[in-house]
Amino acid sequence: MYTSRPLHFHLICTEDNIAYMEKKFALFPRPAYAIEVTYYPITAERVRDRGHRAGIGEQWNVLSKVFMHELLVDVDKAIFMDTDMIFLVDPLELWNDFNKFEPYTLMSFPTLGPTSHPGQICSCIMLMNFTLMRNPSAMFMPSTLLPDTQHSSLAVLPFARGISDGIPSPVADETVSFDPYNPFFADQGIFHVIWLYRPTMFRHLSLRWDLGISLGSFGDELEEDMSEEDQLGRQLALEGSGEEHTLMSPGILHFNCQDKDDIWLFEENHNPSARFGPMVTTALRYKWIWLNRGDGTASVKTRTETDSRWWDERLAEAHARR
C-alpha cells in the first residue's frame, strides 16, 4: 500500500491455497507499480522429509521457515514477514537495511540484546541472505543427502554447543539444553541457537520493524503535538536492545498474541488491545481502493513454480551426475 517501486512476492503454500490467493490478486487490476507473485506449492510431508534430513523438529508446519532459501533457489535475498504484520511505511526503507550487511551476514532480525532467550528474538520479520544460506561449502542447515554437511553446515556447531553448553531459558532464569527436536517457539528456537553461537553472522534489526502488541507497541502513543522527548519518556520494553533511547517510529505493526489468529477477519482484534488498531481497520476496509490507484500501465503477474525440490536434493543430484 505504501510501496514506491515494483514488488515481487514469494508465497510458499499448499496447492489448495493458490486458488484462494488468486481470487484476492484478481481484485488488484491497477497497481501503481508492477507486482509479481510466485507460488511455491509444497506439502507438509515434503517439509517433514527435509526436517528429518536436517535432524530437527516435530512441529513441521511452523519449521518450514528455516528452509525457505532452499525452495527460492533463484532469489538472492528477501524480506520475510508474518501474515499478522502490516507495513506503515514504504518497504524500501526496510529493504535498504541490506546495504548494511557484510559479505558474511546471514540475516537480520530484532533482539533484546546478546543475552536474549528464544522468546526475545523475533523470526516474524527477517532480512535474509539466501545466497549465503545456500553456500554448498557451508549450508545453513545440514542434510543426510550431503554427508559433508554433517560437519560443514552453519547449524552443526551451534546445535552441539546448545546441547552441551545450553541456551537461556524463556521460562526461568536458568540455562537449559537446546533440543533440536522440540525447539522453543519452533523455527525461532532454531534461528536463536545459531544466532547465539554465531553472533557475527547476524545483524540486529531495529525494533521499529516489530512494533508488537505483546510488548505494548513499546509504549508508542498516538497523541497530537507530542514532543520527541515526551515520546521517548513513555517508551517501554526496550531494555537490552541498544535502542532504549531511540524513537520507535513505527515501520511495521505486529498484531501477535491475539485471541483470534487472523486479524484480517476479526475487527474486534484491531481496537481493544492495540493503540494502532484503527490503522489496521482502515487497511482492511479500504485496501482495494487504495491499492488500485495506478493508471493501468502496471499489472499483477502470477506464476507457479513447478520444481519443488529442496536445495539439498538439487545438490545431491548434481553430485551424483559427476
Image: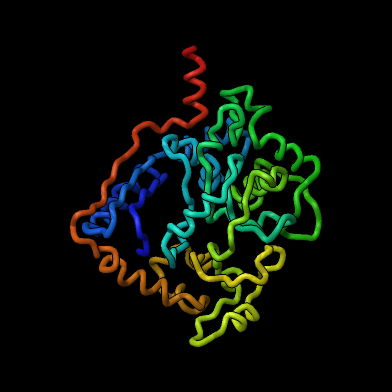
Q: Is residue 15 left or right of residue 67?
A: left
Q: Position of residue 303 (x, y in %)?
A: 29, 41
Disc count in the image?
0
Q: Residue 66 appears at what percent x and percent y?
A: 55, 42
Does 159 appear above or below 187? Answer: above
Q: Residue most toward the bottom?
A: 225
Residue at the location (47% across, 47% down)?
78
Q: Residue at x 60, y 25 (%)?
A: 144
**Is residue 58 in sight in this rendering?**
no
Quadrant the N terminus occupies: bottom left
Q: In terms of image quadrants, where is residue 162?
A: top right
Does 143 appear above or below 277? above
- Spot the residue most to the left: 296
The answer to which quarter of the image holds residue 150 is: top right
Above or below for 93 versus 16: below
Query: Would residue 64 be visible to someone looking at this image?
Result: yes
Residue in front for this viewpoint, 96 or 304: 96
Q: Is residue 317 left or right of residue 147?
A: left
Q: Residue at x 50, y 15 (%)?
A: 320
* Nearer to the camera, 93 or 241: 93
- Residue 107 x/y as whole percent: 57, 47
The location of residue 225, given as percent across then percent down, is 50, 87
Check the image and tell me how it is coloured.
Answer: rainbow
Residue that appears at 59% across and 47% down = 187
